[in-house]
Amino acid sequence: MRRVIADWLTSTEARRPTGTATAELLELELAESTLPASSQSADATAGAVRSGSVGGSDAPSGDDATRPTLRAVTPPGSAVEKSAAGEHPEDPFATTGGETQLPGSAGEHLLQRAYDTEKRARRFYDDQVLDHLNPRMKEFVSGTDLAFIATADSHGECDSSLRAGPAGFIEVLGDRHLAYPEYRGNGVMASLGNISENPHVGMLLVDFVTELIGLHVNGKARILEDADLRAIHPHLPAEFERGRKPERWVVVQVEEAYIHCRKHIPRMEPVARNRSWGTDDVKRKGGDYFAAKGTPRPWHDPQPQRG
């Protein structure tokens, strides 16, 4: 269990985080943040350009001068039709051969052009996005104790889930592969079912305690039984807390790896908790917390009428 450190308390000492971060990072969190004058000027100009008010009497004043005005973007009809037909929209950054060397999707590239963020996006691609795990990333993965997993089925219907364990429960198998364990759960197999139809997965690993930083890992996944992966990687851990042994593993081939910035990550403080790994105790699992039990579902068979 984690406790969120309130950041709205008035006293500086009262709001001082008590996690395990370095003194420099703690001081940085408490310092006031300001935009450089050049950034403020650029944002103001961008907002004025998008609202069509540069050089006219409709230019915003006061705080509104630095607030960009977003405009709705509707993809061209051809893009919509292609999407409906299961085809990909044309990438504006594609070469004459129809391919692009940039990370990301055609959709994000189209919106970068529509919202004039191409330069910022290109700088992020060039500075932060890798097609593998570098040593710092591998070290981060080896120390993490939770990950958010996003999957989708063959129709694009999405699901997100949480995977957690002791620090290092995600195994780094090299620069381009990692694996996370699948334990006995509720039997639904939502994530694994999606992966069986569509191998694309998105992982977000977040350190809420020490570094306040996140790592995105996107790639293609496949499902391996525990014994099969151990035959290939015999170094996998053999001892598990309370006998919580993996039934199978998800092996992810890394295609993109990049930072998730810390500015909106809340600091949390670990507190003592006895995790009930593998329990079937209804109360320890959360029970019917959202009072969903007994609610009619569209997939329930209608009750036969008695005459």
Image (cartoon, grey):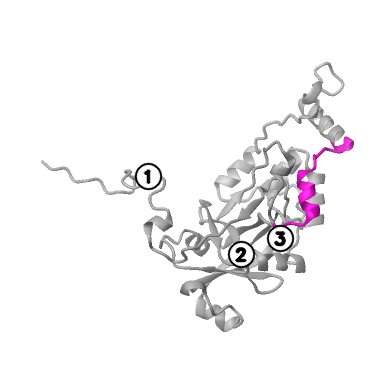
Compared to residue 108, the image places residue 154 above or below, namely below
Residue 294 seen by the camera: yes
Please name the residue shown 56% across and 81% down the image.
Answer: 230
For discs 3 and 1, the disc positioned in front in the rendered view: 1
Q: Does 52 sit above or below residue 90?
A: above
| Identity of the residue drawn at 34% across and 45% down | 297
Question: Is 46 or 156 nearer to us in this picture?
Answer: 46
Is residue 35 magenta-colored?
yes
Report the amino acid beneath label 2: Lys
Horizontal relation, residue 106 to residue 197: left or right: right
- Residue designated by label 1: 291
Q: CA distance from mark 3 to mark 1?
A: 39 Å
Magenta-highlighted residues: 20-39
Q: Which mark is residue 220?
A: 2
Residue 121 appears at what percent x and percent y? Answer: 78, 48
Residue 36 position, x and y percent, is 87, 38
Label 1, secondary structure: give it. loop
- The CA distance from mark 1 to mark 2 is 36 Å
> Viewer-nearest of labels 3 and 2?
3
Identify the image quadrant of the C terminus: top left
